[in-house]
Amino acid sequence: MRLIWYVALGGAAGSALRYVVATWIQARSGGPFPVGTLIVNVSGSIILGLVLRYALESPAISPEMRALLTTGVIGGYTTFSTFTYETAALLEEGDWRRAALYVGLSVVVSLAGTFLGFAGARELLAIRRA
Amino acid sequence: MGSASGAHREGTMHGLTGDRTLMRIHLGERDKYHGQPLYRAIVELLRERHYAGATVYRAIMGFGASARLRTDRLELLSLDLPIVVECVETEERIQAILPELDPMIGGGLITLEAVRVIVYRPETSAPPAQE
């Protein structure tokens, strides 16, 4: 089976997962700050960092499974375009403080999340080799 | 006040000027009636019954009985934006349509208020532009 089908399958699951998670979080936050998208992007960054780093260091995970989990599931789950849309909406209202906070948190915490994922992958690989 | 003089020319559906009732129906954009958008079903019902008119607004933010916030500022919260359907008619005709609207509307809000209609006429009967 061609890789694109694994990507499509994972993408369907990942975007549906984002819909559920982000809606659930946003409904509980109550406020106008896009915390749902933020948490989705941060958690997706952790998982992608972990899965991709782990998969590339361990031959046990096939390219098909990698395409499904990374490009597919996490690609559908995280969203850059929603992040920019919501930032633009905040800027349009002149709410530059929330916009700056959103951009800052998204970039810095997601990046930290990726490194956290790397650390997690290192731990998992150490356990595997032990 | 009474009925305005020039309003009853040919082409006017019926004299609506004077003390009337404004009905406002608050819905969600995704509310459905027999598979089609509920606001469209309501407008079509009012039009079939030759009500004086109806206007549908889509709002940019709001919450209702469910307390769920909707806003066009957030992607996922923009999927069920508030809709308001307005209709101005005689009190009797508004009261007559309410029993039909009730079973169509799942969650929502209907309010009535007194209004005074000043002008009601179709475009074709408008007087020539004044300088």
Image: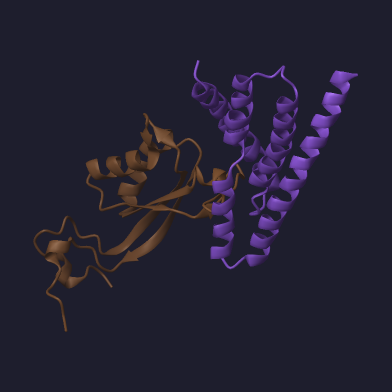
Chain colours: A purple, B brown
Q: Nearer the viewer, residue A101 or A119?
A: A119
Q: Is residue B107 above or below residue B91?
A: above
Drawn side of residue A100 relative to residue B71, left or right: right
Which quadrant of the figure contains the C terminus of chain A?
A: top right
Q: Residue at x 62, y 22 (%)?
A: A63
- Quarter holding residue B36: top left
Q: Vertical placement of A72 versus B5: above or below?
A: above
Observer-nearest residue: B109 or A108? A108
Residue A3: % across, % down: 52, 22
Residue in the picture at 64% in, 40% down: A22
Q: Residue B33 is drawn in which quadrant?
A: top left
Image spot of residue B71 (x, y percent)? 54, 51
Residue at screen point 57% across, 25% down? A10
In-front residue for pair B43/A108? A108
Direction from residue B97 to residue A42 in the image, left or right:
right
The x, y position of residue B20, in whole percent, is 33, 59
**Which residue reaches farthest right?**
A130
The residue sitting at the bottom extreme is: B131
Question: Residue B129, position in %: x, y?
Answer: 15, 76
Task: Give the residue at x 63% y 25%.
Answer: A66
Counting every numbered tag in the picture gives: 0
Q: Is residue A91 left or right of residue B25?
A: right
* Residue at the left extreme of this rendering: B10
Give whichever of B42, A70 is nearer the camera.
Answer: A70
In this rendering, position of residue B110 left or right of residue B3: right
